[in-house]
């Protein structure tokens, strides 16, 4: 992580940083790199330096990630500077969101579970997301943070079913569980991409 990096930054977070958050990371990177977005990931209880599990790698590639990106991943432990540096924090479950906010309370309004962000984004039009970014000026990082705040402003406008804001943890479980986890994660990636593109494209 380069503290001097000026690119808009998204951080994805799960527990071990070998299944869900690296999948979200490399899928988002594949979609958003052309916009200059930096995406990275970490785990609240990371299996430091471990690779993504094989099923996670396979499913990530099937859904558009590069093979090299999938195989290159190594798990990292979530630390405060990562949260401070991120313009948008997307966790895989509510427990990770709580952990992140406890670590850095000031990150509250830009920290969501991935599926929570998607649910809230569905009530925010692309035009309104772009207008929020435009009001923040030209700086890409400011624009992404403003769009994230606009999504935050949707809280309370859509019914929350807490369990549906989590992506199931497939670690050490069946291939079917990995596929279920991926099926929860990938549609939410679409909503993240739409909002980020509204802010930056």
Image (tube, rainbow, N blue to C red):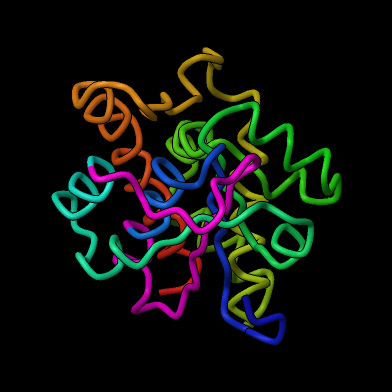
Q: Nearer the viewer, residue 14 or 53?
A: 53
- Compare residues 81 and 162 and report the one nearer the observer: 81
Residue 103, above or below 130: above
* Farthest left residue in view: 62
Residue 184, placed above or below residue 11? above
Quadrant of the rendered image containing residue 45: top right
| Residue 175 part of the magenta-drawn span | no
Q: Which residues are magenta?
A: 27-54
Q: For the N terminus, which image quadrant? A: bottom right
Q: Position of residue 60 (x, y in %)?
A: 24, 50
89 horizontally vs 105: left or right: left
**Residue nearest the viewer, comparing 49 with 86:** 49
Image position of 132 with respect to 37: above or below: above
Q: Can you tell which quarter of the image residue 64 is in?
A: bottom left
User: Residue placed at 41% from the left, 41% from the top?
Assistant: 20
Coordinates of residue 156 in the picture (x, y in percent): 65, 23
């Amino acid at each position: 992580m380069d503290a001097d990096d000026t690119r808009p930054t998204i951080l994805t977070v799960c527990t071990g940083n070998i299944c869900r958050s690296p999948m979200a990371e490399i899928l988002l990177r594949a979609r958003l790199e052309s916009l200059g977005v930096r995406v990275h990931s970490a785990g609240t209880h990371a299996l430091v330096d471990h690779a993504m599990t094989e099923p996670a790698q396979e499913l990530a590639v099937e859904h558009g990630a590069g093979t090299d990106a999938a195989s290159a991943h190594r798990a990292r432990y979530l630390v405060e500077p990562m949260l401070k540096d991120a313009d948008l924090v997307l966790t895989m479950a509510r427990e990770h969101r709580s952990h992140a906010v406890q670590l850095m309370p000031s990150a509250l309004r830009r920290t969501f579970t991935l599926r929570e962000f998607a649910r809230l984004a569905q009530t925010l039009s692309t035009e309104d997301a772009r207008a929020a970014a435009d009001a923040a000026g030209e700086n890409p990082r400011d624009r992404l943070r403003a769009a994230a705040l606009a999504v935050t402003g949707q809280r309370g406008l859509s019914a929350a079913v807490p369990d549906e804001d989590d992506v199931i943890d497939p670690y050490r479980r069946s291939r079917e569980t990995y596929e279920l986890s991926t099926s929860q994660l990938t549609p939410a990636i679409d909503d993240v991409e739409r909002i980020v593109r509204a802010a930056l494209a």
